[in-house]
Amino acid sequence: MRRNIFIFAVFTVLLAACSKEKGNIRIEGQGDGDQLSFNVIDSLTLIASTIDEDSLPGNGISYALIGQLNDGIFGISKSSLYANLVIIEPNSTFPNTEEADSAILFIPAVDGLNFYGNRNYPHQLSVYRTKESINSSNTYYQTNTVGIETSEKTTYYGQLIQTLSDSINFRKGKLEAFDGLRIKLSKDFAKYLMNMPKDAYENNTNLAKYFTGIAIIPENTGLPENEGTFAVFDINNIISTAYRAKIMLYYQDTNTFLFGFGGSSSSINNGITGPYKPEISEQLTNGNKHYSKTYAQALSGVKTKIEIPYLTNLINNGNIAIHRAEIEFFVQDYSEEFFAPPRMNLFRPVNASSKRNYLIEDALVSSNYGGIYDPIRKSYKFRITRHIQDILNKKYFNNLDVKNGLYLAVPSDQPVIGARCVIDQTKTKLYLNYSKLK
């Protein structure tokens, strides 16, 4: 019994010590036909290109993204917010024949990473009343919008995230100040909110007959190259009256009526990207070849496609067991303001010709899947062991070719960020550690 334990221990040590070596592991006393074959390879051919992103969800996202950038590499991109508003405190006796003093829109910025680009750049925003409600039970995409009414338009010029230290007047008291976007709405907008039919202030069903919500749309003209900002706002959190996103309608000097935001399911983050610079347009038009530099962008912009055309050649002489498979992407053309996204996603296409995708199995079952930016190596590394093994197994056992490639994309949520990424494909590596099955 002790002898068996000793032999097992020695065998385990041999495997552990040799698993990092390239080539075969030879165990004395065994014939060549029984040798375990461990191999490491990092020279498989990769074909990389840039393709259009699929339609991404525009509602149900953790936070709201507002802003506009003129990126020297990607061109102009813009993110607008369309959102339903609701009544926070119903009032069946609201004095709708009075004159409004003013109306203030406030949306808090999220804590932490809440901007991309030049945080201090002054933007021109337009605030409109929407003509239709957003149905919270429907799925909207980042290409969707709703109609707007221009007659009460408000124009704002300033930073997206204002550092606010002065408390806000609220009835006969004050509300704590939070950093965020604060806009005084036009007199016409305030008048409209004040003078709706009386039943509008009683409940949300009635409110939606007259006032569905607002649209906040960047409308910068002549935006200089490498200028602009995307800012991240919280329209969901209702921890306090002071913090929550809202419109404060002031009347009779000391009175305030509050309209709140309906939440992420009844709001749309709308993204517009392009036209792109020639380097990106060329790849979108001629994607059937390898490029040394590829691109990925938020707002349903673009993503990188990676193909591994000769992967299944590894099983020409029998199936193999993948012990570890990793792919690493290195970034370039970034700066302090146009920084590398903190996280990237790696997807599997639905089929060879589809832009639709889903997360690879490793992302669903592994705690060390990866995708977090490494500032030392300036790269993103992903563990894709199960993904590679699945491709090989399906080919070996079922003769199914499912090596449809991989998609590298900027996340649309967690985090919400208007980022972009340039990948140096001369450095991209696929590392495989495997053994041949005898």
Image: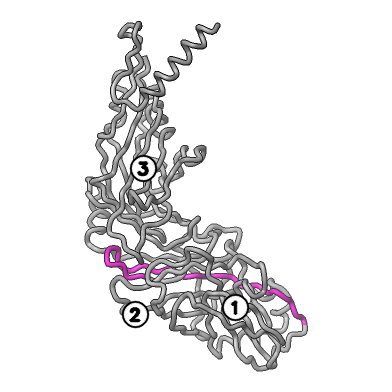
Q: Secondary structure at mark 1?
A: loop
In this rendering, is residue 134 above or below 159?
above
Q: Which residue is mark 2?
A: 221
Can you tell which of label 1 and label 2 is closer to the viewer? 1
Of the residues shown, which amino acid type is indicated by label 3?
Answer: Leu
Q: Which residue is denoted by mark 3 in the rendering?
A: 406
Q: How is the image coloured?
A: one colour
Could you tell me which secondary element the residue under label 2 belongs to?
loop
In the rendered image, the quadrant that contains the C terminus is top left
When the figure is inspected, residue 95 is found, relative to residue 424, above or below; the finding is below
Categorize mark 2 by other alpha carbons within 10 Å: few (<14), some (14-19), many (20+). Answer: few
Label located before the other in sequence (3 or 2):
2
Image position of 334 with respect to 437: above or below:
below
Prevailing secondary structure of the magenta residues: strand
Q: Residues under labels 3 and 2: Cα distance?
A: 37 Å
Dot 3 crowding, Cα within 10 Å, few <14, some 14–19, many 20+: many
Locate residue 171, reporting x and y percent. Answer: 70, 86
Q: Specify which label sits upstream in the sequence, 1 or 2.
A: 1
User: Residue at image x 56%, y 74%?
Assistant: 107
Q: Earlier in the sequence, mark 1 or mark 3?
A: 1
Residue 324 image offset from top left, x and y in percent: 39, 31
x, y percent for residue 102: 60, 89
Camera-side residue of 31 and 137: 31
Give the label, 1 or 3, closer to the camera: 1
| Disc number placed over residue 177 in the picture, else none | 1
Q: Give the residue displayed 43% in from the left and 15% down from the top.
A: 11
- Quarter of the figure with the N terminus: top right
Q: Which residues are magenta?
A: 69-92
| 233 versus 256 height, above or below | above
The quadrant holding residue 166 is: bottom right
